Structures are given as structure tokens and as C-alpha cells.
Image: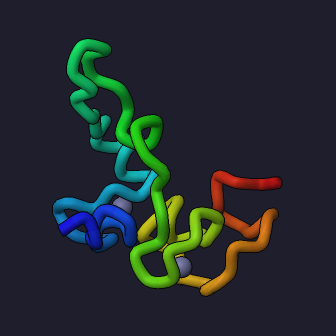
Amino acid sequence: MSDGFLKGKPKGGPDCDCNQCVHDKKLKFNAGTIGEIPLNAAYMILCDICGNKRCPRASNHRLECTHSNKSGQKGSIYEF
Ligand SMILES: [Zn+2]
Ligand SMILES: [Zn+2]
């Protein structure tokens, strides 16, 4: 049930929630009384393959999964 949430949504599909898609499609999360907030502010966007937030694929589904959570990866929004 919450499994998909923890692993991140499948990237590259209509439901893709990579950081680039959140930005491009202006994806919002309905946070109730607070109102709508950007999806990537509501929860951490993770790579659907390796589950790492610093994987470049978590930032943009067009990038390859590196199976790495190292900082400073090219294409990742997490540069440090
Ligand atoms: Zn995407
Ligand atoms: Zn990955």
C-alpha cells in the first residue's frame, strides 16, 4: 500500500513525479489546511529504481539511474 510511496512513483510515465516533472507539470500536493504545496516539498522524490534521492534519475527521469546516493552527481538537484 504505502510501498509505492516509499519507493517513489514509476519514473517516465504519466504519474512521474521526478523533480523535473514536478517543475514542468507544476505538480501539487494537497496539504489540507495549508493548501497546495509543490509535490517535492511534500515528500522526498526518490529514484524508482534504486530509491536514492541523490540519484540523477530522481531529479530527471531522462537521466540514467546510477544506483548511487553520492553527492555531486551530474544532473541531480542535490549537488552537495
Ligand atoms: Zn519525470
Ligand atoms: Zn537510481
The spot of residue 8 in percent (x, y) is 36, 66
Corner quadrant of residue 4: bottom left
Q: Nearer the viewer, residue 73 or 9?
A: 9
The quadrant of the image that shows the C terminus is bottom right
Q: Nearer the viewer, residue 21 or 34?
A: 34
Relative to residue 62, is residue 68 drawn left or right? right
Count of numbered labels shown in the rendering = 0
Figure check: 35 above or below 56: above
Relative to residue 37, is residue 49 drawn left or right? right
The spot of residue 53 in percent (x, y) is 58, 63
Name the residue at 44% across, 52% down.
Answer: 20
Farthest residue, direction front = 1
Name the residue at 65% across, 65% down.
Answer: 54
Figure check: 30 above or below 6: above
Q: Nearer the viewer, residue 45 or 79?
A: 45
Corner quadrant of residue 49: bottom left
The spot of residue 56 in percent (x, y) is 60, 69
The quadrant of the image that shows the N terminus is bottom left
Figure check: 41 above or below 6: above
Name the residue at 38% across, 32% down.
Answer: 38
Looking at the picture, the colour scheme in use is: rainbow
The spot of residue 2 in percent (x, y) is 25, 64
Name the residue at 43% across, 46% down.
Answer: 43
Figure check: 47 above or below 14: below
